[in-house]
Image: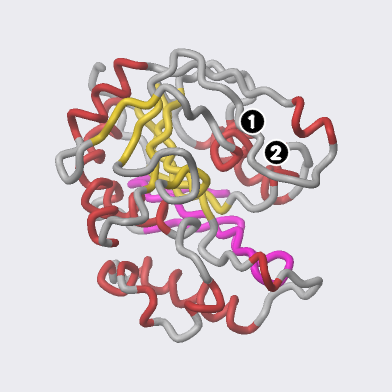
Amino acid sequence: MALIEQMPVVFIGHGSPENAFEKNEFSDGWKNLAKAIPKPKAILCVSAHWTTSAHWRQTGTGVTARENPRTIHDFFGFPDDYYKFQYKAPGDRKFAEQIKELVKTVPVELDYEWGLDHGTWSVLANMYPGAIIPVVQLSLDQNLPLEKHVQIGKELQELRRDGVLIMGSGNIVHNLMLLSTEQSYPWAADFDLKVKEALERKDNALLISYRQIETADFALPTNEHYLPLLYVLGAAGKELPQFFNEKIVYGSVGMRCVVFWDKKLNL
């Protein structure tokens, strides 16, 4: 890939699949982000919904290598139209092979079974509805020490100089067992704020050891929605965070989005 303007690296709080289809403040925020940054040559997404322990892959880290990745409808109880939706972005095997070569922390396997799950396509359907930009996903190995997720992000950082948008997709606060009509539980707001403050002061040690935050166990009973943020931290380098969609919905789902870039955004 030719050297072009360095792309930002982003973490997206994706929330419900409804955001793929509804016009709301969150989908509008994603659309505005796409308008504010250069059009990527390719997209690498680390989604909360492709983990080692929760899906078919038993060990290790995978990267999608299908030329035409399938649209995965990994949710239940939504309208029929949601399951008919197809996000037909192309894959890119050569790009997947490049990622495999760049990552030295762990072995990376080319994967031909997974596709694009809703952590990826629900966001990209708003950002890039034409689905013409190649997209690959990198899986989350939940058996890795947390600092290794950050290290993998560092190893992928150079992709940004090649016009690649690195995107983590999850939720900083994610407790579906305690959904509520309340705007935010106090513990959800507390954890979200402490993560924001740690991001602002570049306190990666706390962000890696986030269980030290006393509200973490309520905010994140499991960590798969948080782990994509660690890849973003690694790929971010010295850039400071910019935030948008700073809201908690259903009491316990944080929609905060974070952009690391050397240019000021107005989102």
Relative to residue 161, is residue 214 drawn left or right? Answer: right
Residue type highlighted by circle 2: Ala
Q: Is the residue 129 above or below the residue 203 in the image?
A: above
Disc 2 secondary structure class: helix
Relative to residue 119, is residue 45 drawn left or right? Answer: left
> In the image, is residue 248 part of the stretch drawn in magenta?
yes
Q: Is the residue 169 above or below the residue 88 in the image?
A: below
Q: Which of 139 and 120 is in front in this view?
A: 139
Q: Residues within 10 Å of mark 2 (few under 14, many from 20)?
A: many
Residue at 76% x, 25% y is: 84
Residue at 73% x, 66% y is: 250
**Residue 42: x %, y % from top left:** 40, 24
**Residue 17: x %, y % from top left:** 70, 44
* Quarter of the figure that contains the N terminus: top left
Relative to residue 70, is residue 160 drawn left or right? Answer: left
**Residue 244: x %, y % from top left:** 56, 56
Q: Distance between the residues labelled 2 and 1?
A: 6 Å
Disc 1 secondary structure class: helix
Q: Which of 121 and 25 is in front in this view?
A: 121
Q: Mark 2 points at which residue?
A: 20
Specify start and end residues of the magenta stretch as a single range: 241-267
Determine the residue located farthest toward the left in the rendered image: 104
Q: Find residue 125 and name its label.
A: 1
Residue type highlighted by circle 1: Ala
Q: Is the residue 97 above or below the residue 121 in the image?
A: above
Relative to residue 264, is residue 151 drawn left or right? Answer: left
Query: Which mark sits nearer the N-terminus, 2 or 1?
Result: 2
Residue at 54% x, 37% y is: 120
Q: Is the residue 55 above or below the residue 172 in the image?
A: above
Residue at 48% x, 44% y is: 47
Q: Do the residues bearing badges 2 and 1 touch, measured as CB atoms within 8 Å?
A: yes
